[in-house]
Image (tube, rainbow, N blue to C red):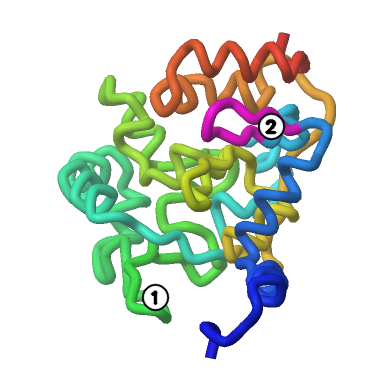
Amino acid sequence: MIKNLKAKYERLIDDLSRETDERYKQYLISRPRTLVHQNLIFDLEHLDSYYDCQGCRQKRRKAFCCADHDLELTDRDIAEIEKLLPAACAAFPGLARQVREKGFWEWGEDFERVMRKKKSGECVFLMPGAGGCYLHAWALSAGRDPFEVKPYVCALYPLAVILIGDEVVVTTVNRVSAKILDCGNGVHPCAQKRGKKENHTLVQSRAMLVRMFGEQVYKIVCDRAPGND
């Protein structure tokens, strides 16, 4: 019974029993390229990177963002997609064929609602070839903001925002964070150490970061990750 443990050993057991996400947070804080600002922890080692999603599709690679994983949907995600789906199907007959019989989501193994996948393992909203995302393309054609149309996790990619206790970790989907995100072994990080300025993670994700944390915090992060200058 824990009440009979001496305080010293109670602390030792508590330390060994610490959850993986708590240990991950401490690991990040110990890293030289981590920025801690109030309760925000920015993993600059991975945020200072470059993503070229169009290049990925041209090479016909299956990136983690578009295939081979279960994308969990929120109530808001499903409601928003259901509203726009008729118009998107009218604009893209290929999408209409994909969702006509089974819709765009299904029940997951743990009774969560996940995005339906094609037989190839690709997301049902992924266009053939190098076309990109049907939802993103429809939003642009309709004058809508893709961030407001696509599922939250899709709009966030390549960012990953993880709540650990009272802290918020901001990183990317990578082989380290995959252990916390429960991505399994199918993660294919697309990050490069060098690339065009417009492909820098902080440049591509500017709108999302500003929405979530504000302009001032975004500037502080950019000042510490000079690769996007």
Residue 69, image x and y in percent?
Answer: 55, 64
Magenta region: which residues? Answer: 34-42
Residue 13, image x and y in percent?
Answer: 68, 76
Residue 159, image x and y in percent?
Answer: 57, 39
* Res 197 quadrant in image: top right
Q: Residue at x 20, y 42 (%)?
A: 84
Q: Is residue 50 visible?
A: no
- Comes first in the chain, label 2 or label 1: 2
Tell me if residue 203 comes above or below residue 126 in the rendering.
Answer: above
Q: Residue at x 74, y 38 (%)?
A: 191
Q: Nearer the viewer, residue 135 or 157?
A: 157
**Are the two marked residues, 2 and 1, in contact with CB atoms closer than 8 angstroms?**
no
Q: Residue at x 54, y 28 (%)?
A: 38
Q: Relative to 165, is 112 on the left or the right? A: left
Q: Is residue 40 magenta?
A: yes
Residue under pointer 1:
108
Residue 66, image x and y in percent?
Answer: 54, 52
* Amino acid at pointer 2: Leu
Mark 2 to mark 1 CA distance (whole Å):
30 Å
* Type of secondary structure dominating the magenta stretch: strand
Decide: few, some or many residues near mark 1? Use Cα within 10 Å; few <14, some 14-19, many ≥20. some
Q: Residue at x 39, y 79 (%)?
A: 110
Q: Which mark is residue 47?
A: 2
